[in-house]
Image: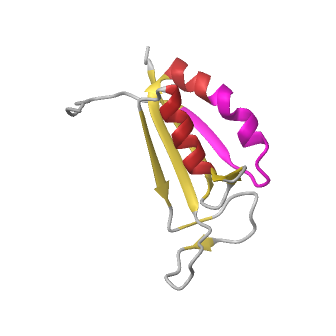
Amino acid sequence: MNDNSILKIYASSTDKIGFDLLYEHLVVQAKKKGIAGVTVYRGIMGYGLSNNQIESSRFWELTEKLPVVIEMIDKTETLQAFYQFIITDLGNLPKGCLVTMHPVEIKFQKTGEK
């Protein structure tokens, strides 16, 4: 049995929870809840079911609406609890998002010195 999972949240770089950007809000909350690791990836192009147009990175635009993926790795039960903690926030987003969770096999992990 695999005890670890990866939780991925697909959203837009402009999505907000209150006055905070969604991805910043989720990273802060994950840190507070002790999630082992979180990375946010910004896409250069993409689309989703809640938007009819393809969004892409253009160097002349100051504010870009781009896809983001918030990726978290931890014990499966820890991620399940975190998902239950954020599901109301995600459900209240005016635009859509997608959440997936998959088992992950950690092959190597070395923590650095603090």
- The quadrant holding residue 80 is top right
Nearer to me, 19 or 39: 19
Residue 8 at least partly seen = no
Count of all numbered marks drawn on residues in the image: 0
Image quadrant holding the C terminus, namely top left
The residue sitting at 71% across, 41% down in the picture is: 90
Nearer to me, 26 or 77: 26
Relative image position of residue 107 (x, y in whole percent): 28, 29
Q: Does residue 103 show up magenta in the picture?
A: no
- The quadrant holding residue 89 is top right
Relative image position of residue 73 (x, y in whole percent): 44, 32
- For the view shown, which residue lies furthest in the left direction? 113
Left or right of 106, for residue 70: right
The residue sitting at 62% across, 68% down in the picture is: 65
Relative image position of residue 33 (x, y in whole percent): 52, 27
The residue sitting at 57% across, 81% down in the picture is: 61
Nearer to me, 77 or 1: 77
Residue bounds of the magenta highlight: 83-101
The residue sitting at 22% across, 30% down in the picture is: 110
Image quadrant holding the N terminus, namely top left
Q: Does residue 99 show up magenta in the picture?
A: yes
Relative image position of residue 25 (x, y in whole percent): 59, 45
Left or right of 93, for residue 98: left
Nearer to me, 32 or 45: 32
Residue 51 at least partly seen = yes
Quick check: 1 above or below 70?
above
